[in-house]
Image (cartoon, rainbow, N blue to C red):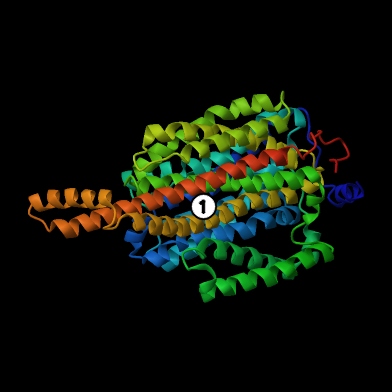
């Protein structure tokens, strides 16, 4: 409690939320929400159209992935830094400058003529855009009174989860209907509007420019190397065979050394670049853990579904987007329900239902075959969309709802970082499991497709005779087709392994929910520990 009091005294410039909302603040908040939506959408909007960008820039297959990686590395550095920057220059300056910079970088990305330019512009876009995301969470829990959070929390929860989910849909449509340039040009007009509105309407806090003298530059450098290297290792590790690649080893060493320096300075200097003391609040610590797992559920499943549809079903980006739209629709419908329930139901019960729904959806996916299509994926996607919202709203409230206003800006950056890191760790683990289990299953299946197996021999003869009847080399064609069938089944079985693991992960979170206390609203003095 003493820490709470100190934190409250350290930042007197933050106002207490008022019961009657100023219309100017509402306009400012909704402009901020649009800005956050753009920043989060931009991660996934490009992922569905990397092939089109690769062709347009004549990039190599080993280079094109950096269009995503550069954005993610830059963003993950900015997200925890945003709380400190907001204190120094004010939320108004940080957000409006971030919106303007993000818009300018989007326009530049559309003009890129080679892969090097695109990677540079995407890094700028990710770094500047990362400043917008935590600011919205901080504003929601600072300027709105607790009585309004049942409305506000579902809005930011919906935007934070809907944007990555509909990204492939929007990206696929834009690149098909127009060209890949419009993946970036689509940000320009909304970005200009957001930057203008937030500059004139945000008045939540005052700058504390004197803090720049105490700014921990060594801590910032250590954090940038720590998080940037970690993101690089997680993104590129599986493709480069992990620690058999010298770049991954170098990245891992840099991550470890920089992490030690960063954490040392975070607890030793007067004004750390990120204030980690928010983790002393038990609800915030558990909320961040749940946010980490939600990152796995959000980004991991947004990756797995399109991967299955593209690799096994042969869908293009537009068809994948149309199939994935079901999850987004389910979220949109569930958001007001989650808001209604959050004011009337124990958040722990909501989260239990949400995690159980997640587990049910991934368990259904563990029954998949190579023939699964839109209708087979319908129920798992609906369960995922509904469960995301039922979890996200109470997790937001548990993590940030009981912190004192002075802590919220910094804590919001940490909280959003956990979701992004959850996604990065989740994707790295998922990719590694898919690769290793696919090799394992292929070897096991191949043992049965050999001359000593009468069924395999009979199947091969039938295939060979069909090809021979069409004037082709039947035996060679039959061997190739059987190998392709074995490969496909190995891929399907590796997907099933991942979905089973995710089922157990979400079920284990229900045990975590039982360990948190029922959150009480923050009182006038701040929040409880």
- Given residues 126 and 456, the one toward you in this image is 456
The image quarter containing residue 509 is top right
* Picture layout, residue 226 above or below residue 28: below
Q: In the image, is 308 to the left or to the right of 251?
A: left
Q: In the image, is 499 to the left or to the right of 268?
A: left
Name the residue furthest right. Answer: 2
* Picture layout, residue 132 above or below residue 473: above
What number of labels is visible?
1
Q: Is residue 38 visible?
A: no
- Given residues 312 and 214, the one toward you in this image is 312
Q: In the image, residue 40 lies at what x, y percent?
A: 54, 47
Residue at left offset 67%, top offset 44% = 290
Residue at left offset 38%, top offset 35% = 374
* Picture layout, residue 455 above or below residue 346: below
Q: Residues within 10 Å of mark 1 (few under 14, many from 20)?
A: many
Q: Is residue 522 visible?
A: yes
Quadrant for the C terminus, please.
top right
Residue at left offset 46%, top offset 64% = 239
Residue at left offset 31%, top offset 47% = 314
- Given residues 364 and 311, the one toward you in this image is 364
Q: In the image, residue 69 lies at what x, y percent?
A: 51, 61
- Given residues 487 and 251, the one toward you in this image is 487
Local SS, label 1: helix
The image quarter containing residue 400 is top right
Q: In the image, is 524 to the left or to the right of 201?
A: right
Residue wearing tag 1: 103
Q: In the image, residue 94 lies at what x, y percent?
A: 66, 52
Q: In the image, residue 313 lies at what x, y percent?
A: 33, 44
């Amino acid at each position: 409690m003493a820490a709470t009091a100190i934190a409250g005294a350290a930042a007197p410039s933050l106002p207490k939320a008022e019961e009657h909302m100023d219309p100017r603040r509402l306009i400012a908040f909704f402009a901020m929400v649009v800005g956050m939506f753009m920043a989060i959408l931009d991660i996934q909007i490009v992922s569905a159209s990397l092939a089109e960008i690769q062709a347009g820039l004549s990039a190599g297959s080993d280079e094109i992935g950096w269009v995503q990686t550069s954005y993610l590395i830059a963003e993950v550095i900015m997200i925890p830094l945003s709380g400190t920057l907001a204190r120094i220059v004010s939320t108004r300056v940080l957000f409006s400058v971030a919106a303007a910079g993000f818009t300018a970088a989007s326009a530049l990305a559309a003009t890129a003529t080679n892969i090097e330019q695109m990677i540079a512009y995407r890094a700028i876009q990710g770094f500047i855009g990362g400043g917008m995301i935590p600011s919205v969470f901080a504003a929601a829990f600072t300027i709105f009174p607790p009585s309004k959070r049942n409305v506000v929390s579902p809005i930011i929860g919906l935007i934070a989860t809907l944007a990555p989910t509909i990204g492939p849909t929007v990206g696929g449509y834009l690149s098909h209907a127009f060209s890949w340039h419009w993946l970036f040009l689509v940000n320009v007009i909304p970005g200009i509007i957001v930057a203008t509105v937030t500059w004139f309407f945000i008045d939540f806090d005052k700058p504390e420019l004197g803090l720049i003298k105490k700014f921990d530059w060594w801590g910032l450098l250590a954090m940038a190397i720590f998080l940037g290297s970690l993101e690089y290792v997680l993104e590129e590790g599986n493709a480069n065979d992990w620690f058999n690649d010298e770049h991954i080893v170098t990245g891992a060493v840099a991550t470890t050394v920089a992490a030690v320096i960063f954490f040392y300075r975070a607890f030793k200097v007067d004004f750390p670049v990120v204030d980690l003391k928010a983790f002393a609040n038990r609800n915030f610590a558990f909320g961040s853990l749940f946010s980490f797992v939600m990152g796995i559920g959000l980004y991991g499943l947004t990756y797995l579904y399109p991967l299955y549809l593209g690799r096994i079903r042969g869908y293009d980006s537009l068809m994948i987007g149309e199939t994935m739209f079901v999850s987004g629709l389910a979220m949109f419908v569930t958001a007001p329900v989650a808001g209604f329930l959050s004011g009337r139901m124990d958040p722990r019960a909501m989260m239990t239902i949400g995690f159980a729904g997640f587990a049910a959806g991934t368990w259904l996916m563990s029954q998949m075959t190579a023939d699964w299509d839109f209708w087979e994926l319908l129920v798992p996607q609906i369960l995922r969309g509904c469960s995301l919202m039922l979890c996200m709203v109470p997790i937001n409230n548990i993590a940030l709802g009981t912190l004192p206003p002075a802590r919220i800006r910094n804590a919001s950056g940490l909280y959003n970082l956990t979701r992004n890191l959850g996604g990065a760790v989740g994707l790295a683990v998922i990719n590694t499991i898919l690769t290793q289990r696919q090799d394992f299953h292929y070897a096991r299946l191949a043992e049965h497709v050999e001359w000593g197996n009468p069924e395999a021999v009979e199947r091969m003869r039938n295939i060979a005779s069909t090809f021979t009847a069409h004037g082709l080399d039947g035996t060679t064609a039959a061997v190739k087709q059987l190998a392709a069938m074995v490969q496909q089944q190995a891929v399907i079985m590796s997907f099933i392994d991942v979905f089973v693991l995710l089922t157990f992960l979400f079920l284990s979170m229900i045990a975590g929910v039982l360990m948190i206390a029922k959150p009480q609203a923050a009182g006038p003095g701040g929040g409880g520990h």
